[in-house]
Image (spheres, rainbow, N blue to C red):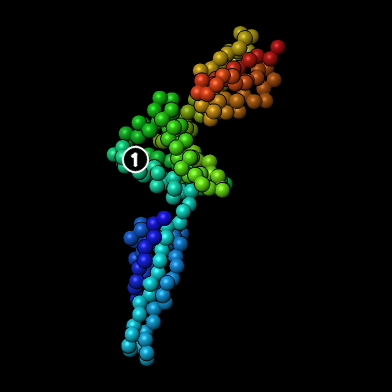
Amino acid sequence: MEEIEKTAKTVDEAVSLALAQLGISREEAEIEVLEEPSRGFLGILGTRPARVRVRVKDTPSRRARELLDRLLEAMHLPVEMSIEEKQNSLYIAIAGKDVGILIGRRGETLDALQYLVNLYVNKNQTQRYRVILDVEGYRRRREETLQRLALKLAEKAKQRGRNVVLEPMSSHERRIIHTALQGRDDIYTYSEGEEPYRKIIISPRK
């Protein structure tokens, strides 16, 4: 964990110097006051500055950003990144020029990257977080596409009276299809096969 010590005339000034050097906000820091400032005898002799130790908090957001910064720097890919943390989930949005390389064919690269970040964020942690990584709104667009596809293929299965087999998908995308069609009384869905070739079957009810 990154930490530094700083001295200054006051505690606040020493903390500000440390935060600036670490490049973090006060909310991201653990602050320990090692020595309070003193003016010495009669305020004339033996003036002693304040001394503080500031550490970077080890948070899920910090761990996720740390890994992604390293990976993207190795790829020479400048990006803008925002991380939102709520209800034991991290929502990470990446934007920038040439970031399509992070998505890959049908999101395969994005899924692999998300898996790595999940592993890194949750390593040796008692509280587990679910990481959702998105690039240029790809996941939202893909979800809308899959929902439309699910409805179209459900009608096809219903009209033809036989199963429609979808191509293999990730568990996340299969969940979108299942959710889009759940509750219908004319068709039902189920998955078969082994990962990474597991696929959805849309079947008409007899």
Q: Which residue corresponds to mark 1? A: 72
Foreground residue, 131 or 116?
Answer: 116
Q: Is residue 75 left or right of residue 143?
A: left
Q: Amino acid at mark 1?
A: Leu
Foreground residue, 119 or 68?
Answer: 119
Foreground residue, 141 or 12?
Answer: 12
Q: Which residue appears at 47% of the width and 35% of the height? A: 115
Q: Residue furthest bottom?
A: 42
Q: Is residue 35 above or below residue 175?
A: below
How far across and down, in percent of the image, does residue 182 sit? 64, 25
Q: Is residue 166 left or right of residue 6?
A: right
Q: Which residue appears at 39% of the width and 60% of the height? A: 3
Foreground residue, 54 or 169?
Answer: 54
Q: Which residue appears at 60% of the width and 28% of the height? A: 179
How far across and down, in percent of the image, does residue 30 sit? 46, 62
Q: Is residue 118 above or below residue 160?
A: below
Q: Is residue 43 left or right of residue 178?
A: left
Q: Which residue appears at 40% of the width and 24% of the height? A: 105
| Quadrant in which the C terminus appears | top right
The quadrant where residue 99 appears: top left
Q: For the residue carrying disc 1, how many other residues have a C-alpha within 10 Å: few (<14), some (14-19), or many (20+)?
A: some
How far across and down, in percent of the image, does residue 35 sit? 41, 75
